Image: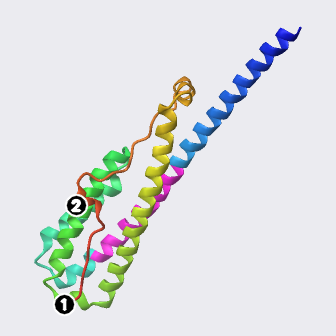
Amino acid sequence: MIPIYVVLGAISLVLFWGIGMYNSLIRTRQHVKESWSAIDTELKRRYDLIPNLVETVKGYATHESETLEAVTQARNNAVASTGSPGQQAQDENMLVGALRQLFAVVEAYPDLKANESFLHMQRELTVTEDRIQASRRFYNANVRALNTKTEVFPSNMIASMFGISQAEFFELEEAAERETPKVSFTN
């Protein structure tokens, strides 16, 4: 009778361990989803600021329509991006590049650089960029935790049994693009 209890105890122990490991993987996957939602919220905030920024610049730099159209197109592509974090990062790279061009154009217009509305939007964009970076770091930390759990033994066995796969990091392609767009309106 004792050997049966020992076997049942061992089976119970393995079963509880498996349930605990599965629940840990699911919690970590939910953290990844939640942190992606935080990035999505901050990106939407940026997308909402850009049309106002473009309209303000239009009033001062009407002959810079090519740059303004590039920003608008990049924004529209980023808004429409619903793919993987990698695809979203590519679209964000294009948007950040277009914003850099826009701010380079702004340097040639001292009246625009002094415009209170433009300065307010510039501050809001800077705050938003900081929040996006913080959200990106939080998301990537959660992705790292999930990916580690899906690779290390013995949790990788539970992950593969239940189809829990690795998540994709949200990374920008080039080192120069990893930085927040630098905007200076001082003379």
* Residue 52 visible from this viewpoint: yes
- Asked whether residue 174 is drawn in magenta, I would say no
Determine the secondary structure under disc 1. Answer: loop
Q: Which mark is residue 176?
A: 2
Q: Is residue 74 visible?
A: no
- Given the image, on which type of amino acid does mark 1 rest? Asn
Q: Measured along the vertical axis of the image, is residue 180 above or below residue 173?
A: below
Q: Position of residue 49 (x, y in %)?
A: 36, 72
Give the quadrant of residue 18.
top right
Residue farthest toward the left in the current orientation of the protein: 63
Q: Main secondary structure of the magenta part?
A: helix
Residue found 25% across the figure and 51% down from its top: 173
Q: Is residue 172 above or below residue 156?
A: below
Magenta residues, start to end:
33-53
- Residue 39 lies, in percent from the top left, at 44, 58
Residue found at x 43% / y 67%: 131
Q: Do callouts 2 and 1 mark residues in contact (Cβ within 8 Å)?
A: no
Residue type indicated by callout 2:
Ala
Residue 175 against residue 72 in the figure, above or below: above
Residue linked to disc 1: 187
Instruction: Count all numbered tags in the image, as a single digit.
Output: 2
